[in-house]
Image (cartoon, grey):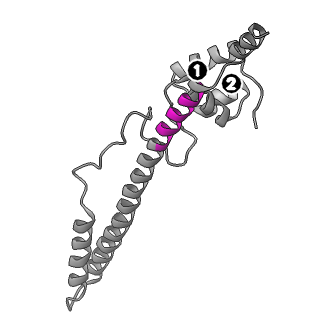
Amino acid sequence: MKGKLWSKDEELKLKHLLDAGNPYYVIAAQLGKSQEAVRQKLIRLGLKHVEHKQSAFPCSTTSVHTPPPQLPTDLPSVEEALTILAQALKLANKPDLNPIEIRRIQAVAKLAKTYKELLADYIDYRRIETKLIEMEEKYARLAQATQSTAPTPDKDAATQAATP
């Protein structure tokens, strides 16, 4: 279903707001349009995408052409976190642990487990984000290809007027 047509003034304001680095929700509010309408118009105009700051997990990219950042190299891997967890479990089996050592081992074990889970979620999120970016690029190419092959109303009217 199509909404209200965009005026030239609205398109100019859209470009100005985009150039100023505003996210979709700000642009949509300024123009009195939905975020989806803003996104679709940006695709139709062939303009770059902006960061969608309303998401609970902000996109790490400012353009669909910029790949997401790589995982920092100084973070321990899942294997390293599991090794720390295994060491804590072994220490927990030692006899004659005092209460402070027990709490320390419990804290290390809990931190290692939490880290492993969060790291796995982070890696999965980045994979999903990369796939979404690829799909947006494909959609933009398809929309542009469809737009360039679709006859314009002016050409159709001119062709019909010229035909006896």
Where residue 46 sits: x, y (%)? Answer: 52, 24
- Which mark, residue 119? none
Q: Is residue 103 left or right of residue 161?
A: left
- Magenta region: 135-147
Labels 1 & 2 near each other (Cβ < 8 A): yes
- Determine crowd level at label 2: few under 14, some 14-19, many 20+ residues with C-alpha closer than 10 A: few
Give me the residue at 76% from left, 38% from top.
1
Q: Nearer the viewer, residue 87 or 98?
A: 87
Q: As drawn, which residue projects farthest toward the bottom?
A: 95
Of the residues shown, which amino acid type is indicated by label 2? Gln
Residue 112 sits above or below residue 95 on the image = above
- Which mark, residue 30? 2
Q: Main secondary structure of the magenta part?
A: helix
Judged from the image, the secondary structure of the residue bearing numbered disc 1 is helix
Q: Is residue 126 left or right of residue 96?
A: right
Give yes or no for residue 164 being in the magenta stretch: no
- Determine crowd level at label 1: few under 14, some 14-19, many 20+ residues with C-alpha closer than 10 A: some
Q: Nearer the viewer, residue 70 or 86?
A: 70
Q: As drawn, which residue projects farthest toward the top?
A: 162
Judged from the image, the secondary structure of the residue bearing numbered disc 2 is helix
The residue identified by callout 1 is: 17
Q: Quadrant of residue 76?
A: bottom left
Of the residues shown, which amino acid type is indicated by label 1? Leu
Where residue 137 sits: x, y (%)? Answer: 47, 37
Q: Nearer the viewer, residue 73 or 139?
A: 139
Where residue 110 sits: x, y (%)? Answer: 35, 72
Q: Quadrant of residue 5?
A: top right
